[in-house]
Image (tube, grey):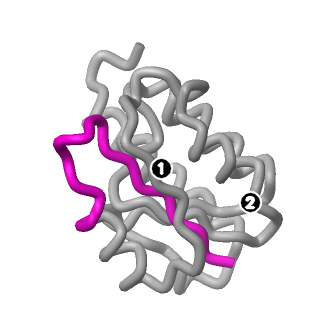
Amino acid sequence: MKIGYARVSSENQNLARQIEALKKSGVEKIFQEEVSGKSVQNRPELQKMLEFIREKDIVTVLDLDRLGRNAQDITDTINLIQQKEATLDVLSLPSFTDIQDVNLRGLLTNLVFEMANSIINPNRN
């Protein structure tokens, strides 16, 4: 199942752009919230999504920074998704879905995530 997660940091921001992109990509179920990314634990919809996902699900977000505010939060969330044997698709990053070799696809995807995470969070806390 293709599952989406959308988040904005404040009520002044609009989720519509993220939700539209997720639906366009074929997402079947969307978890959404208007809450600061400061604490992963204080994001109930993210926690529900992490509980909901199963093996072979595809978790989709518009941007990598929707998963957390800093490098450690993003990495921890990606690791939780992978522990459930689901995959992560970030619409603003290159996708390797056409690569048949699962190990190569995972390696390339993780490499792109690490590079993007370094750019988003240059101080890597």
Please state the horizontal and vertical placement of residue 125, each as a whole percent of the image: 41, 13
Front residue of this view, candidates 114 and 34: 34
Among numbered discs 1 and 2, the one appearing first in the sequence: 2
Question: In the rendered view, does 45 fall on the left or right side of 92?
Answer: right
Image point 70% across, 65% down: which residue?
Answer: 103
Disc 2 designates what residue?
Answer: 53
Please state the horizontal and vertical placement of residue 89, each as a whole percent of the image: 50, 65
Residue 118 is drawn in which quadrant?
top left
Question: Alpha carbon of mark 1 to alpha carbon of mark 2: how far?
Answer: 23 Å
Above or below for 87 versus 115: below
Disc 1 designates what residue?
Answer: 111
Image point 31% across, 64% down: which residue?
Answer: 18
Image point 36% across, 69% down: which residue?
Answer: 19
Residue 43 is drawn in which quadrant?
top right
Q: How crowded is mark 1: few (under 14 residues within 10 Å), some or many (20 or more)?
A: few
What amino acid is labelled 2 in the image?
Answer: Ile
Determine the residue located farthest toward the front in the rendered image. 11
Residue 3 highlighted magenta (yes or no): yes
